[in-house]
């Protein structure tokens, strides 16, 4: 007669042990990499770099008198006084947008410091939310406002719509995505009294924005445009992010550089409450 293994037999306990190891090991490796990456980034960003740059190190489109930057924790700690003093043959930083939140799981760990010190340096500031397709849009709007102390005099909030590198949004129903974008914009507009802007690139503009959301200003990212970038539905953009490789005093990492399609007075007018 074959002897049956009991629940407490050594062979069965050993098999269960190795099965548990095989299940846990991939998750342990994943979280170890995430934690290492997080603390490495924090360590590397402990102090702002003080390197002086002679120029923004990129070709700046002509015909625009107002330029600005956008940053996140990837830009590390920033010396905003040095940013304010940056002068490349008359080209200065007039405004700065900074990432506040992403989806429902991230408050940018440099946001609070950026938000405060940019204002202290007298740089016109604004905040943006990185939209994730997997999370409820209305919850994302609440999450953004909960962590973003927008005050009178700040630029309008921005919804960043691009590949979130988590979920392939093409698998989702397009109408579902459009309803989510609308829900975020309408909720934030109602709560802040300012009409939010939409940041996106040409691919996602064509996918979701073209022909939709016409009351909302557009901030377009396009790095390869020859001459002035044009939107497919002939709408006028408000901001154009033309480079992601610019250099700026007070910032150690390459940054995004933008132009505004108007005067400094028109930029300040965007702060008006509805």
Image (spheres, rainbow, N blue to C red):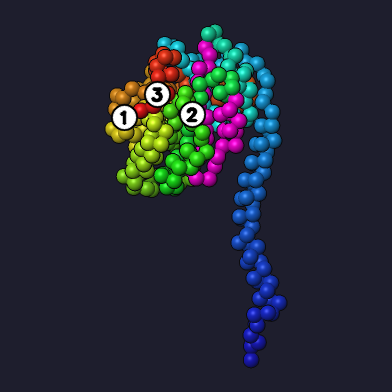
Report the magenta residues as a range.
91-117
According to the image, label 2 marks what residue? 151
Q: Residue at x 66, y 66 (%)?
A: 18
- Residue 249 location in percent, x, y? 62, 18
Which element type, helix, strand or loop, lies under badge 1? loop
Res 215 label? 1
Q: Quadrant of the N terminus?
A: bottom right
Residue 68 visible somewhere in the drawing: yes
Task: Identify the mark nearer the N-term, 3 or 2.
Answer: 2
Query: Looking at the picture, does residue 61 appear above or below residue 179?
Result: above
Residue at image position (32%, 33%) is: 213
Please, what secondary structure does the residue beneath circle 2 have?
loop
Number of the label disc, if any, that sits on residue 121: none
Q: Which quadrant of the structure image shows residue 137? A: top left
Find disc 3 in the rendering and name its residue: 272
Between 233 and 141, the residue placed more toward the observer is 141
Q: Earlier in the sequence, mark 1 or mark 2?
A: 2
Q: CA distance from mark 1 to mark 3?
A: 15 Å
Give the image location of residue 186, x and y in percent: 36, 37
Q: Position of residue 114 (x, y in %)?
A: 58, 28
């Amino acid at each position: 007669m074959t002897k049956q293994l009991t629940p407490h037999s050594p062979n069965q306990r050993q098999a269960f042990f190795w099965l548990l190891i095989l299940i846990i090991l991939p998750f342990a490796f994943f979280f170890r990499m995430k934690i290492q990456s997080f603390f490495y980034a924090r360590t590397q960003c402990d102090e702002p770099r003080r390197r002086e740059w002679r120029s923004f190190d990129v070709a700046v489109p002509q015909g625009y008198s107002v330029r600005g930057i956008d940053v996140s924790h990837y830009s590390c700690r920033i010396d905003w006084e040095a940013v304010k003093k940056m002068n490349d043959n008359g080209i200065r930083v007039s405004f700065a947008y900074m990432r506040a939140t992403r989806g429902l799981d991230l408050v940018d760990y440099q946001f609070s410091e950026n938000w405060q010190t940019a204002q202290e340096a007298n740089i016109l500031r604004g905040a943006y939310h990185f939209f994730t397709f997997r999370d409820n849009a209305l919850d994302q709007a609440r999450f953004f406002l909960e962590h973003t102390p927008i005050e009178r005099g700040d630029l309008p909030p921005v919804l960043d719509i691009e590949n979130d590198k988590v979920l392939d949004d093409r698998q989702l129903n397009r109408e579902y995505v459009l309803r989510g974008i609308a829900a975020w914009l309408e909720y934030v507009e109602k709560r802040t009294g300012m009409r939010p802007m939409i940041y996106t690139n040409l691919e996602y503009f064509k996918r979701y924005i073209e022909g939709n959301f016409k009351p909302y200003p557009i901030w377009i990212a396009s790095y390869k445009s020859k001459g002035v970038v044009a939107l497919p539905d002939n709408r006028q953009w408000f901001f154009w992010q033309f480079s992601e490789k610019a250099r700026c005093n007070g910032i150690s990492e390459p940054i995004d550089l933008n132009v505004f399609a108007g005067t400094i007075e028109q930029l300040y007018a965007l702060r008006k409450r509805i």
